[in-house]
Image (spheres, coloured by chain):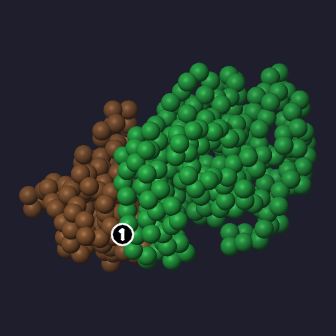
Chain colours: A green, B brown
Amino acid sequence: MNHFNYQRPSSLKEAFNAKSNFPENSLFVAGGSDIFLLLKKNIIAPDQLISLRSIPELKGIDKTGSRIIIGSGTTIREIEKSELIQKYCPALYDAVSNMASVQIRNVATLGGNIVNASPGADTAAPLLIYDAKVIVINSQFEERIVPLSNFFKGPKRVHLNKNELVKGFILEIPAIGSGSAYLKFMKRKAMDLANVGVAVQLLIEKDICQDIKIALATVAPTSIRAVKTEAFLRGKSLTEANLIQAGEIAATEISPIDDFRGKAWHKIEVVKAYIKRASILAKERSNL
Amino acid sequence: MTKLTFTLNGDQVETWIEEHEMLLDILRENFNLLGAREGCGMGECGACTVLVNGLNINSCLFPALEVEGQMVETVEGLQNAGKFHPLQQAFLDNGASQCGFCTPGMLMSAKAFLDEKQTNPKTVAEIVTEAEIKRALAGNLCRCTGYFQIIDAVKAAAKEQ
């Protein structure tokens, strides 16, 4: 492992100052559960790491009106324990409560999981169905707000400049009566990454699906919204025939690859099954 | 070298470290606390588990500098005045340790789990379920016991508390 210099700023201002001292080869690090692995494997070798752990501006979960704001430095465990998240964003709760181990959840952060931009990131699909926006701040303290769907550039790549960092995320609380769920297909019962992840948020009135959002993880270069599938189900009843048809449409929206975790053909079959299951679970949770 | 000051198993301690060192390295090398071990070194096996401010973490992935001013607990701090912690006694009584490599990490994850149960007024009255214990220990691998004895031990310790 490369011998790096380790900075622990206690404010955003100090963090950006530290970065400007070594602009070429310095990295912001949140929980570090991904970065320290890359360091140990000598995949990256930064001269300086700037820890974001002690910056109060990056922490916390708040509700303002119909929105939930989550600081990028909030740990996965803090999100799991949050009553606001359990109540208003159950699909995100499903995802975080089933991620890695307690040890990792105690350090890993929401900002880290998103900026790391794994196609299988467990928090991305739930954030997408809550219409999440990313609050990006630069060293001049200017903020820009980007829809999460436009933030991912590709596997492990996001639209973030060197003088920027992610401050937090804005989630839209679904309309009253909505239900949402995230299902993750894994080979093991715990401590595994998603083979396929499916998040669904829907609003049903008089048996008709008034609104639906579906997001898929691990079956495309980034986590994606399945917009064609959503359009098909909107205005329809969640009958078995419609859900089977929805799965077939979803299969046309994805581009899974064969990898260590599974074969592409199998991931397609799992997506079909999980669209059905996640929609039914979201429906069961609605109107509660 | 950088000076690091923190609370270790209840004592205020001070040591000199390199900035890139992980908490596991300094616990073992600077303090000769050999309970926490490097198994995988990648946050998968949990053999390096210690508590920082009561939360269980993988010390192999935790920069030592992050414990400045914080409270660290290792398995060596579990005994009280020569008497085993209820979890240690329960592990002994239930045969929950064979080769012993994972045991310190198992004990610390179990401690974090039971301590949190105790401090949360909402959960204190609840019975500790097997499913909860399995979830709490998901990040600690054991290749000997088959886990049943470990789960039984945590259940037994929960009744003690």
Q: Residue at x 33, y 70 (%)?
A: B21
**Drawn side of residue B84 relative to residue A20, left or right:** left
The answer to whether one can see residue B89 in this image is no
Q: Quadrant of the C terminus of chain A?
A: top right
Q: Which of A47 and A214 is in front in this view?
A: A47
Work out whether A74 lies above or below A237: below
The answer to whether one can see residue A109 in this image is yes
Q: Quarter of the image holding residue A169?
A: top right
Q: Which of A97 and A167 is in front in this view?
A: A167
Q: Where is residue B106 in the image (x, y as percent from the top left)?
A: 35, 63
Q: Return the residue at label 1.
A: B20
Q: Residue at x 72, y 59 (%)?
A: A154
Q: Quadrant of the N terminus of chain A?
A: bottom left
**Drawn side of residue A105 relative to residue A116, left or right:** left
Q: Residue at x 50, y 50 (%)?
A: A109
Secondary-structure class at tag 1 = loop
Work out whether A17 lies above or below A195: above
